[in-house]
Image: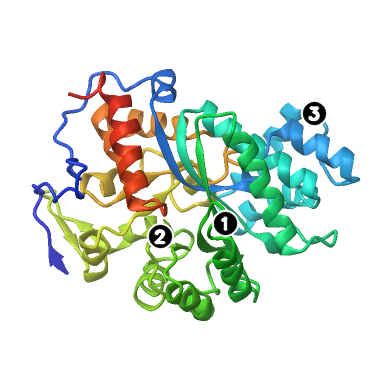
Amino acid sequence: MAEATSTLENSTPETATSTPETSTATPAATSPSLDAIRSVPKVLLHDHLDGGVRPQTVIDLATGTGYSNLPSHDPEELARHFVRGANRRSLDLYLETFAHTIGVMQTPEALHRVAKECAEDLAADGIVYAEIRFAPELHTEKGLSHDEIIEAVIAGFKEAMSANPIRIGVLLTAMRTFAHSLEIAQLAIKWRDDIVVGFDIAGEEAGYPPTRHLDAFHYIQRHNFHFTIHAGESYGPPSIWEAIQFCGAERLGHGVRIIDEIQIHPDGTPELSDLAAYVRDRRIPLEVCPTSNVHTGAATSIAEHPIGKLRDLNYRITVNTDNRLMSNTTLSEEFAVCSDAFGWTWQDIRWLTINAAKSSFIPFDDRLAIINDIIKPGFAHLVE
């Protein structure tokens, strides 16, 4: 294992951002309030379209499409049902809750509405840029083609973007338990000039290593495009290692199990394995979703979530929602609960927000514009 010093030097900022990747702020006596966090500009990189549907929309779409399996037609009770179903400390059980949202998202009209409302809800939470992922292969039950599905979702996002101060980038996701990843990768390249910014694989991690989809990742790489891989959520460091060293992942969806490769000595000095050091040294972004990680059993509680130590060690952490319906959360709430648990200040929140902007899959100049023209001015009155 590589020994790491307890006092970490500032890393070199990205060109023209003048923003170090470490924070020297001392914890504030009072954590930033939820309302205040909601008012500042934020960036979201890991959010599933079918995991953030409004409860009333699920009910409306079920009625309109003839879906008859909902456990309740009361929006408050239905919302509680999703959270109860998700919060069972198992990724397998967590994924079961998607049967209802996917069940009602099988028509162009439904997909358009869900995408439009997703962008509206994120904009209302102060998010200025978001990458939203969905799996076209899950929405074909009524005969829609993958292109029709993608077209409907993009149209919904575009309608919302025209009326709200938010930019959406789409990630096309392949299910790692299926065998269509190359086809989905080809679709990502086909739609890359129309707000599709990357590719992803998702689904049950154990028993379905990312190397099963090497042809899809190689296809994305050969076309000079971007991809992230769900890794290090329900399965440990071997999944992270394969995602990075065999598949070439630019980002890690979740990635929190890298904590298994870090030992904290009694004197507080951290010792990193070669893999843990590599992830940090290469500034590989971790798309961390704290509340979801507790619900799936990847962490025991927010207070004991690895994000606290990983932030202290200056990993390229980003804060995300994963599934806003299933975890009953927003990005502002994720920042608020972590600020309460770990004493994060406004400087920490800005640092994490800039991390996300730096790690996005949009062009470099666009990233800089978001950082310099939106994020920094939005935090100027809060961070010296």
Looking at the rendering, in which quadrant would you find the N terminus?
bottom left
| Residue at (22, 67) in percent of width and height | 273
Q: Which residue is mark 1?
A: 91
Q: Amino acid at mark 1?
A: Leu
Q: Nearer the viewer, mark 3 or mark 1?
A: 3
Mark 1 and mark 2 lie on one chain; the one further toward the N terminus is: 1
Mark 3 and mark 1 lie on one chain; the one further toward the N terminus is: 3
Q: Residue 179 at x, y = what percent? A: 64, 76
Q: Residue 145 at x, y = what percent? A: 77, 64
Give how far apart the Cα atoms at labels 1 and 2 are: 17 Å
Toward which corner of the image does residue 178 lie, by quadrant? bottom right
Q: Residue 208 at x, y = what percent? A: 55, 74
Query: What kind of element bears circle 2?
Result: strand
Give how far apart the Cα atoms at labels 3 and 2 are: 37 Å
Q: Nearer the viewer, mark 1 or mark 2?
A: 2
| Residue at (8, 47) in percent of width and height | 7
Is 257 on the left-hand or right-hand side of 187? left
Q: Amino acid at mark 2?
A: Leu
| Residue at (39, 24) in percent of width and height | 37
Q: Which residue is mark 3?
A: 74
